[in-house]
Image: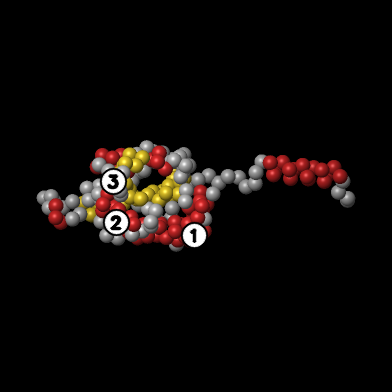
Amino acid sequence: MNKTPAFLFALALSAALSACSGTAPRQEPPLEGARIGGAFSLTDQDGQTVSDTDFAGKHRIIYFGYSFCPDVCPIDLQKIAAGFALFEKQQPERAAKIQPIFITIDPERDTPAVLKQYVSAFHPRLIGLTGTPEQIKAVADAYLVMYKAQKPEGGDEGAGYLVDHSRQAYLMGPKGEPIALLPYDESPEKIAAEIDKWTA
Ligand code: NI
């Protein structure tokens, strides 16, 4: 049977309608609507006060840890930095609107000066944030990050100590809203792909 003009008209109309209503349905970010994040006021590696609103309009990659961490933090940070550096190569303009942030959960030892040296070892645009123990507790709570210093009995200050802490690499949106967790134990390609997917 021949296709009638009416059929062709209906086809054209439906194509036009679907073009109007968009293509694939929007994929919901995994952390959309989660109660994670919020306002903070901290001190950066140059001793300047920094608030969450200073990053308005920028996506943020946020990782909590501490510079004395012997193994986990440096490995995670290296991988996140490698993924971000790859994304910078692929999409320099979009990457410029993403701020990578390291927040210490060991503010006693992670002074701005200590953080300055630490963050620069991973990525030139990584900023390090510290604060009072109360400020750090508040921001860690807001990001659902748990931590506990394993200080030796008797308070031997010279002995050093480890801090147990949870590992999350958050991708937050331009209003500070949670979007996704970055797969910090994957390849730079996969991390870059995840950044690409949620910051388009
Ligand atoms: Ni660590």
Give the amino acid at mark 2. Gln
> Label 2 to label 3, Cα distance in Å?
13 Å
Q: Which residue is mark 3?
A: 47
Q: Which residue is disc 2 drawn over?
A: 117
Residue 89, numbered circle:
1
Q: Is residue 44 left or right of residue 184?
A: left
Q: Of helix, strand and loop, which one carries label 1? A: helix
Q: Nearer the viewer, residue 108 or 114?
A: 114
Residue 73 seen in render: no
Assign a secondary structure to mark 2: helix
Q: At which x and y percent is residue 127?
A: 35, 50
Task: Residue 146 in the image: state x and y as whole percent.
Answer: 30, 46
Quarter assignment of residue 43:
top left
Give the Cα separation between the discs numbered 1 and 2. Answer: 24 Å
Residue type marked 1: Lys
Q: Is residue 4 visible?
A: yes
